[in-house]
Image (tube, grey):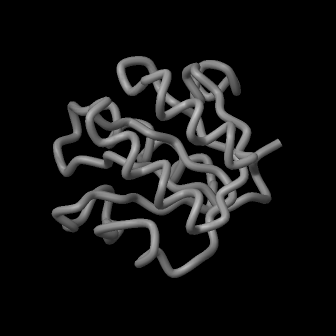
Amino acid sequence: MYENKTLVVFGVSQDPAKYGNKIFKTLLSKGFRVFGVNPKGGVAAGEKLWPNLASVPAKAEVAILVIPPAALEDAVQQCIAGGVKEIWFQPGAQDPQAHELAASAGIEAVDSCFMADNGLW
């Protein structure tokens, strides 16, 4: 279902023990077209991390948010500006206001684990 879409993961850490890194590496290993976003930049799984959605060199259709609740509104605003169609708020990265902001902008907002719900873990 998502194989032909461009995905972006917000909250990709360079630390392989963090969930953002694990999600990113798993999606890469399964052949997804995926970009990682981390405000600090860097590299994870051999791929460049972009400081924000606007810097990603492709138009993302799906965003997976693995970030603290305090950072969600900014990420949703980036997704609205970038034309993202679907946002997955991962467990621990959920906030009713951010969810409502996404939904009111016409973005499909999902409060669930992308990886588990799509049989990737």
Would you say 81 lies left or right of 66 here? Answer: right
Q: Quadrant of the C terminus?
A: top right
Would you say 68 lies left or right of 107 here? Answer: left
Between 68 and 121, the one nearer to me in the picture: 68
Q: Position of residue 75 (x, y in %)?
A: 41, 51
- The quarter of the displayed image where residue 104 is located: top right
Q: Position of residue 53 (x, y in %)?
A: 45, 67
Q: Position of residue 95 (x, y in %)?
A: 43, 24
- The quarter of the displayed image where residue 101 is located: top right
Q: Quadrant of the N terminus?
A: top right
Between 54 and 74, the one nearer to me in the picture: 74
State the residue at coordinates (72%, 52%): 85
Would you say 45 lies left or right of 64 here? Answer: left
Q: Position of residue 109 (x, y in %)?
A: 66, 33
Q: Indicate whether 58 appears above or below 65.
A: below
State the residue at coordinates (33%, 69%): 50
State the residue at coordinates (63%, 55%): 31
Between 62 and 108, the one nearer to me in the picture: 108
